[in-house]
Image (cartoon, rainbow, N blue to C red):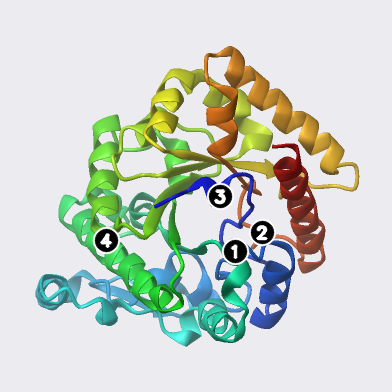
Amino acid sequence: MDTKDLKGLATGIGSLPHIDADLALDLIFKYIPQIPFWPQLPKRNMRERMVAQFSQGLPCLRLDEKGLFFDSEILEQEMAQFYEHIVADDNEYFKIAPDFAAGLWQFLSRLEKANLNQIKFIKGQVTGPFTFAASINDNEGRAILYNSVLIQAVQEGLAMKARWQIDLFRRFSKPIIIFLDEPYLACFGSAFTPLNRQDVISVLSEFTKKIKAPDVLTGVHCCGNTDWSMFTEVPDIDIISFDAFNFFDRIMLYADQLLGFFKKGGLLAWGIVPTQDFNPQINVAVLSQRLNAGIETLIRKGIDKDLLKKSLILTPSCGLGVLNSDKAEPIFKCLAELSSTLRIES
């Protein structure tokens, strides 16, 4: 797949603060039409929150008015049924229903009516296995992340949900990007997480191998700081997405690993437009200066300027789901203007 068309383009992370899916999509197709994505809308109801949204079809998970919970009483029966669908390669069993993802189904409707000529890539996303498993407790109050059998099932099920999205998007004959959203990995290295470095590399390697294809780029997004070199060692990760507004100084510590990542065709998604920190004083000039300073720092670390710029795409620093809806448009407008400026300068 030729990724030169991505150079300097912009896309979103996933969540938006809207209740109305059409209003969210209006924003996406207005400001980032070249890499549109389906909006996750957690304010609509609890089914659209980032873990519950991907829970259908995974074993022993139930959703009630209090939220998502794990029911071990049915573990043996449901695990057997679950793996029957995995072995059968039954992507459709892992579909995301319209009442769990209004933004996804409206996105498909928009694409069917849209002029596809300006679209370079179509983006989807799924909650990553570590974040998903760390967010659900078993009957004893312990995160299922600590259970090797359950984390394996989570990994398998979420990969199928990613593959189901890929099947949906292929009808439009465009290359596809799938992000794994892993905010939990900002906890990596603390005393409160059971993970070691090889755990992360192994699970993400197995996960991305299941969804990688000639027409699919896989990315991982972490909105906090982490050991970024882990992602460069996962063979099928094509895009590393990070909060460039707040954490650029941390990622530059891994310049040597990033150089190898770029040389094998990897891309860096710079979350340069802040979400929580966005205010009227932040504009294209301010962000261009910040972005160029980051680029120059990596050049001084030994990364070729042309290689760096052709490996760069832009995003907000994180999802916008927790913001007020009136803050979303200024962020996307700034993102679009910055992308346009960057592509002209390049």
Q: Residue beneath label 4, please? A: 154
**10 Å crowding of disc 3: few (<14), some (14-19), many (20+):** some
Q: Residue beneath label 2, please? A: 320
Point out the tag, 3 or 1, that comes first from the N-terminus.
3
Q: Residue beneath label 3, please? A: 6
- Relative to 249, residue 233 above or below: below
In the picture, which quadrant includes the C terminus? top right
Q: Position of residue 9 (x, y in %)?
A: 63, 51
Q: CA distance from mark 3 to mark 1?
A: 21 Å
Callouts 1 and 2 close, C-beta under 8 Å: yes
Q: Secondary structure at mark 1?
A: loop
Point out the tag, 2 or 4, that comes first from the N-terminus.
4
Front residue of 34/5: it is 5
Point out the tag, 3 or 4, that comes first from the N-terminus.
3
Q: Which residue lies at the image location 82% right of the left edge and 66% below the top edge?
A: 326
Q: Position of residue 249 (x, y in %)?
A: 61, 23
Q: Secondary structure at mark 4?
A: helix
Quick check: 318 left or right of 105? right
Q: Is residue 276 visible?
A: no
